[in-house]
Image (cartoon, rainbow, N blue to C red):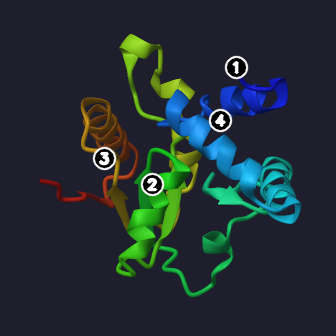
Amino acid sequence: MLAPPLQRLVTELSKLPGIGHRTAQRLAFHVLRTSDLDARALAQAIIDVKEKITLCEICFNLAEGPRCTICLDERRDLRTLCVVEEPQDVIPIERTHEFRGRYHVLGGALSPIDGVEPEDLRLAQLYRRLDGITEVVLATNPTTTGEATALHVAAALHERSPDVTVTRLASG
């Protein structure tokens, strides 16, 4: 029923998480109604994200360049590390303005049923960062896989660096 370019846009938008066919249609018609300038700005923003955003070489957070803004911030506490599953998990913690340390993004959570084993996460890089660290805050998600990951990481940290304090974010 839709013209092929519009149908293609609906199809592509519906591939986004949480966007069903109806929402994709609404978004496509919205793009159609916007000015050429706004539509091109949206398209360019998508292209820029894909071309310019990488992972920080230190913590694996999102970065524009080799290091993220948090790793570049010299005011950060170098002795405290917060371990999260994915880059988007950094945002709510930063929003609190309470944590002043640095981060380590694992790139997922342990899930043997899905084939995600310890070697699939950035655990070796985490263990290499422990020199000078006094506290590691485990901020994995409060899910079964997040809890399993936290337990695994905590045990490995206690074994490798018994002097490092390992804490867990409260939930509930």
Q: What number is the disc on residue 158?
A: 3
Dot 4 lies on which element?
helix
Q: Which mark is residue 13?
A: 4
Q: How crowded is mark 2: few (under 14 residues within 10 Å), some or many (20 or more)?
A: some
The type of residue carrying mark 4 is Leu
Q: Distance between the residues labelled 2 and 4?
A: 24 Å
Q: Which-is-in-front pick, marks 2 and 4?
A: 4
- The residue indicated by pointer 1 is 1
Q: What element carries label 2?
A: helix
Considering only order in the chain, which callout, 4 or 2, is on the residue closer to the N terminus? 4
Label 1 crowd (10 A; few <14 / some 14-19 / many >=20): few
Q: Where is residue 141 in the image (x, y as percent from the top left)?
A: 32, 45
**Cβ atoms at labels 1 and 2 below 8 Å apart:** no
Determine the image quadrant of residue 124.
Answer: top right
Residue receiving disc 2: 89
- Give the CA distance from mark 1 to mark 2: 40 Å
Q: Which of marks 1 and 4 is nearer the N terminus?
A: 1
| Residue type, mark 3 in image | His
- Tell me the kind of residue under disc 2: Asp
Which one is in front, 63 or 167? 63
Q: Are marks 1 and 3 in contact (CB under 8 Å)?
A: no
Name the mark nearer the viewer: 1 or 3: 1
The residue depicted at 34 percent of the width and 60 percent of the height is 137
User: Which image quadrant for residue 122?
Assistant: top right
